[in-house]
Image (tube, rainbow, N blue to C red):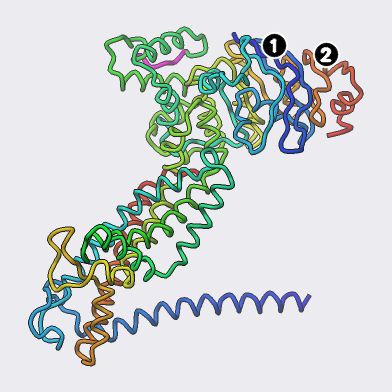
């Protein structure tokens, strides 16, 4: 599993200082929550981990972000490979303007996955303990399976992983825009998983969802964190308490405190963290 | 309280009045054209080229102008799409800096406002330089120049309306700018792009000044790109210019045919774009 470390990460938007001198190691194979009040740099920190921040105007990044020992801000770094390794879930789930099926197949297509790679991936997924009710064709998938059939199986696997398969299996070729917001977020999760990331970044992934859908997403994270490193931005303190193993507390662009969740919530060291955790500031 | 309610009523009334005026003008134009032209509209008017005694309003029709106009507008649209679509796409901020984009928009706006006789004169100069005489090809070139700014600017607006968050999803999966543009931006902007083509087509098929010197006028249906071509707007112009009431009525009939062509093209384009619009993310 990849190791993410930030060294003196500094982000400026024009003259506005978004993040100052953030240095932290994000624990592997755990769920890390980034908490803090609005506008404190949570999303900036998250988007600097897959260089999505590059899309902003006039953004300047200083310091290093090391993923598996490689600085992703190195001019020679391969941004496309980085983004394949690091999946992303946005705040408002946006389906791509295509069918449910194509939404999942988009990643494998753009990364030009070969028939062999697809089958390899299915083989791996088959061993995952959380995919119990896969259809029998998946068991029989071999190198002689047609490519289009293999992609079908792949789509099914990921929809199952995101807990969406049962709801959409009869309308895979309908527009994804027709799904409910909660379903769209699970589709976004399945779509992100389909490029085989090792890290999942999620920017307030439940804030647009109803409580039931939000709970579903949280449950998916609960089992996904065994195989992935997950970083979730949230402004819901109770959510952080429920799901986080490790917590970063940001305040006005500064990383005030970070540590294991129990410790940070029960015995915060910094007075600002204490005030935030107790609900005195928000 | 009564003052505010009065205010509300007055402004609602004013807005309704404007709307009413706009609709009245539209209906009036159609009514005049139909009232004056319908009596001369016959099958021979649509299907035949002008025959002897035509200018006295005896026989034949304007098939030469109908076919010529359709050729000119389709050819012009085709050339304009070839230039407008890439222009609209390259003006996305991932590709083009803000300054160059602003300059391009300003130039397109200026070209949009340029009288079409100027394009006609410009096209004529180019044609003389190339040794061409008035021909279908010359008309198509001049007309594509008239259409270009309208189409490019309207397409660019449609492309600009694609939410950044939607593109972010694609980039976050490791897609390149080209893949994102072709699979996400183009699909999402498609209805707007169709509208842009339609807008330019409508303007182009109705334009007389730009093709006056470049396409010329003839009683025959053009058989090659180098033959001169007749057109409906010029047919209307010439027929209205005669002192004979019968011929003038034929001008209104020609105008009616032009209106119907534009209407049919709009309806067809709407139907086509609705078919593609089902994947659009709102």
**Cα separation between marks 2 and 1:** 15 Å
Q: Is residue B132 above or below residue B30?
A: above
The chain to which mark 1 is attached is: A
Q: Circle 1 sits in a helix, a strand or a loop, which is it? A: loop
Side of B175 where A271 appears, left or right: right
Side of A249 where B199 appears, left or right: left
> Is residue A133 in the magenta section?
yes
Residue B47 position, x and y percent, is: 13, 71
Side of A11 where A146 appears, left or right: left
Q: Is residue A234 above or below residue A263?
A: below
The chain to which mark 2 is attached is: A
Q: Which residue is mark 2?
A: A263
Q: Is residue A174 above or below residue A62?
A: below
Point 54% across, 52% down: residue:
B103
Tell me if label 2 and label 1 are in contact, CB under 8 Å.
no
Please state which of residues B218 and B248 is positioned toward the viewer in this rendering.
B218
Residue B35 position, x and y percent, is: 29, 85
Q: Which residue is mark 1?
A: A27
Quarter that holds the N terminus of chain B: bottom right
């Amino acid at each position: 599993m990849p190791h993410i470390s930030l060294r003196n990460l500094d982000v400026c938007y024009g003259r506005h200082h978004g993040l100052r001198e953030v240095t932290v190691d994000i624990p592997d194979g755990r769920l890390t929550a980034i908490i803090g009040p609005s506008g404190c740099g949570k999303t900036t920190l998250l988007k600097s981990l897959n260089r999505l921040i590059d899309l902003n105007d006039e953004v300047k990044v200083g310091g290093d972000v090391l993923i598996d020992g490689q600085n992703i801000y190195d001019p020679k770094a391969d941004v496309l490979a980085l983004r394949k390794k690091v999946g992303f879930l946005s705040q408002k789930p946006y389906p791509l303007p295509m069918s449910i099926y194509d939404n999942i197949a988009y990643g494998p297509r753009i990364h030009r996955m070969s028939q062999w790679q697809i089958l390899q991936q299915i083989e791996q997924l088959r061993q995952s303990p959380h995919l119990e009710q896969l259809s029998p064709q998946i068991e029989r998938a071999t190198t002689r399976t047609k490519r289009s059939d293999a992609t079908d199986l792949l789509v099914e696997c990921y929809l199952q992983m995101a807990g969406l398969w049962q709801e959409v299996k009869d309308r895979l070729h309908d527009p994804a825009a027709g799904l409910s917001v909660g379903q769209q977020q699970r589709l976004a999760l399945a779509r992100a998983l389909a490029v085989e990331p090792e890290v999942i970044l999620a920017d307030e992934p439940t804030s647009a969802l109803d409580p039931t859908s939000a709970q579903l997403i949280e449950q998916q994270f609960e089992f996904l964190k065994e195989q992935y490193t997950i970083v979730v931005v949230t402004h819901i303190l109770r959510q952080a308490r429920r799901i986080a193993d490790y917590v970063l507390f940001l305040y006005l662009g500064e990383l005030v405190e970070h540590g294991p969740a129990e410790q940070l919530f029960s015995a915060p060291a910094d007075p600002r963290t204490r005030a935030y955790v107790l609900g005195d500031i928000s | 309280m009564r003052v505010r309610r009065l205010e509300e009523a007055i402004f609602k009334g004013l807005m309704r009045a404007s709307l009413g005026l706009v609709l009245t003008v539209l209906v009036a134009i159609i009514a005049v054209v139909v009232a004056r032209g319908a009596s001369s509209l016959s099958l021979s008017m649509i299907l035949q080229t002008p025959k002897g005694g035509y200018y006295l309003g005896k026989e034949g029709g304007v098939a030469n102008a109908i076919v010529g106009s359709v050729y000119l507008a389709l050819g012009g649209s085709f050339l304009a799409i070839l230039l407008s679509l890439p222009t609209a796409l390259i003006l996305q901020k991932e590709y083009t800096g803000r300054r160059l984009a602003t300059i391009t928009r300003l130039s397109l706006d200026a070209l949009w406002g340029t009288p079409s006789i100027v394009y006609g004169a410009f096209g004529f100069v180019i044609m003389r330089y190339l040794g061409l005489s008035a021909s279908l090809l010359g008309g198509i070139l001049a007309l594509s120049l008239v259409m270009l700014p309208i189409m490019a600017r309207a397409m660019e607006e449609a492309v600009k309306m694609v939410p950044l968050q939607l593109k972010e999803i694609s980039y976050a999966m490791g897609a390149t700018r080209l893949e994102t543009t072709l699979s996400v931006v183009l699909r999402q902007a498609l209805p707007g792009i169709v509208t842009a083509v339609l807008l330019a087509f409508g303007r182009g098929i109705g334009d007389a000044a730009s093709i006056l010197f470049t396409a010329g006028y003839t009683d025959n249906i053009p058989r090659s790109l180098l033959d001169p071509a007749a057109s409906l707007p010029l047919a209307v112009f010439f027929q209205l210019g005669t002192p004979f009431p019968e011929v003038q009525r034929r001008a209104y009939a020609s105008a009616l045919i032009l209106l119907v062509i534009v209407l049919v093209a709009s309806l067809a384009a709407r139907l086509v774009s609705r078919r593609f619009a089902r994947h659009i993310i709102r």
